[in-house]
Amino acid sequence: MRKFMVVLDDSRECLNAMRFAAMRAARSEGGVVILSIIPPEEFNHWIGVGDIMREEARERVHAHFEVFAKWMRDKQGVNPELAIREGEPVSQILTHIAEDPEIGVLVLGAGTDKKGPGPLVTQLSKSAGTLPIPITIVPGDLSKERLEAIT
């Protein structure tokens, strides 16, 4: 089964990327992998404190995932899987893609502010020609209706 991988983060554009991945997966009988990456700098504390912070970060990820997963199951009939990794985002995305041969498309949301599309879109599009799978970049300001029409 082909899977669409989408990155879960705190950005506004993440919502459209999630919607797009779920809608495409539903229409193509594929799956969705939601990848959350916990940056390493969150745990640069005493060992005990770092462990507590790591567990709290994982709990936040699970809570956010459940919101998206419920919508995907209820509205799109897609049961997503969650993957949590720790480290630098781009390297963790590439490692996860390499480890799961069923991932066929990386879906990223593009920011709409003047700073640019966002760090992941910027960094990954620079190496798009050498990636093992295509990237779909979803504009952050597309309406739900437009997303439905596109997918």
Image (tube, rainbow, N blue to C red):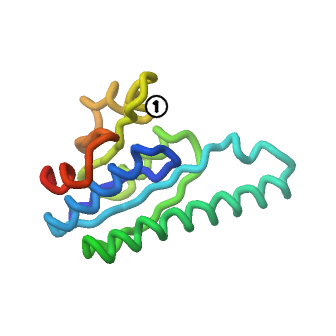
User: Where is residue 4 shown, x and y percent of the image?
Assistant: 28, 56
Amino acid residing under circle 1: Pro
In the image, residue 62 sits, relative to residue 16, either above or below, namely below
Q: In the displayed image of the protein, which residue is found farthest to the top?
A: 114
Mark 1 residue element: helix
Would residue 78 be visible to someone looking at this image?
yes
Q: For mark 1, what is the residue?
A: 119
In the image, residue 130 sits, relative to residue 148, either above or below, namely above
Q: Quadrant of the C terminus?
A: bottom left
Q: On the picture, is 26 further left or further right than 45?
A: left
Q: Residue at x 29, y 39 (%)?
A: 139
Q: Quadrant of the N terminus?
A: bottom left
Q: Residue at x 28, y 72 (%)?
A: 75
In the image, 26 versus 30, the foreground residue is 26
Q: Residue at x 70, y 57 (%)?
A: 54
Would residue 102 be visible to someone looking at this image?
no
User: Where is residue 147 shown, x and y percent of the image?
Assistant: 21, 51
In the image, residue 88 sits, relative to residue 85, either above or below, namely above
